[in-house]
Image: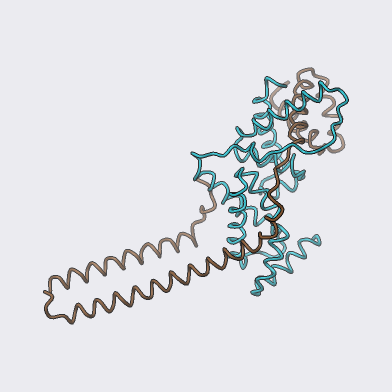
Amino acid sequence: MNSMERDRFHLLMMKALDGELAGSEHSEFDNFLRDDECRREWQSYRKVKEATMDLKLSSPAPEVWDGYWRGVYNRLERGIAWILVSLGAVVLSAWLALEAVQALWANAQVPLIVKIGIFTLAAGFFLLLFSVIRERWFTSRHDKYKEVIR
Amino acid sequence: MNPTSRHDDELIARIQGGEKEAYGELVRQYMQPAYYSALALVGSHDEAMDCSQAAFIRAYGAIRRFEKGRSFFTWYYRILRNLCLNRLRDRAAQAVPFSLVLQVQEVASAEDDPAASTDRAMLRDEVRRAMDRLRPEEREIIVMRDFDGRSYAEIAELLECPQGTVMSRLYYARKYLKDLLEDVL
């Protein structure tokens, strides 16, 4: 049997195991079974199939289904709550930072070099934050490979 | 269009209009296939619960992009599958034996011969153990076909591949299983 015939036999064997043979495929498959090697292979696969058919996935406790939607709903609600908490934290931090900068600028006792240092540090920090957020947002919107499992 | 997808479309239109309770109805409709599909991939009840619920949350977030006329479950399954495979990749070092979530179906034995019946039970135990060594994608296709009884057409739709690929994947999964069971076959 050449490799093409072998591939054809394997394909028909899967269909036969799963009851998906159609029309003339039955006789084509029966012809293959005249060969001893094919018949032995077919019997082995049948045994494997019968054994897997005897198994099933175990079920969770029946109460799981009663609370399933509640679980999804609670997690959805919590997700919204986290977004609000994060947003509030960002707004408050920004306001505090602005207040601190204004107070520092108005303080005549702080040397100019320290003021400049703190301003550049703050500016750099916000620029970094903005860049990371923008990159994440852009990637989540435009990365066509995001569904690919790496 | 079949009645289920028409019903789904109506529900989805209500969800897109902001009715959260309609989403509850949709979740209740698909929670069991979702849960068992996740279980087939991750092999743990806790993680199946977590992944299937997380996938419903993601699906809700993207529901406005859902195209009318498509099968909700097929669309949802893609999200679920990616989540489960990512979860497996993250916890690769602490793999859970899949055989822990497998049990024997309670069916009346058709064998009259006690020896044949014992052989079959032995083979079943070996198959259970061998399932631990399959890759998640191989387990997934065997569960879809042999446990859930899905047709090739349904599997092809869920996995977004041609039916020929389904048969070929089934063949390789079963071949690997058969090779692992060489001594008892």
Q: Position of residue B180 (x, y in %)?
A: 64, 26
Where residue A12 appears, as percent x and y from the top left, is: 77, 32
Quarter holding residue B135: top right
Q: x%, y% of residue A106?
A: 18, 82
Residue in the picture at 67% in, 67% down: B23
- The chain coloured brown carries which letter? A
Residue A9 picture quarter: top right
Quadrant of the frame with the N terminus of chain B = bottom right
The total of numbered circles placed on residues is 0
Residue B61 location, quadrant: bottom right
The residue at the point 77 percent across, 26 percent down is B120
Q: Nearer the viewer, residue A4 or B17?
A: B17
Residue sitting nearer the eye, A88 or B74:
A88
Name the colour scheme. by chain
Give B29 or A1, whichever is nearer the viewer: B29
Residue found at the very far bottom of the displayed protein: A106
Residue B95, relative to residue B84: is it above or below? above
User: x and y percent of residue A7 in the render?
Assistant: 71, 29
Whether residue B27 sits left or right of residue A22 in the image: it is left
Q: Colour of chain B?
A: cyan
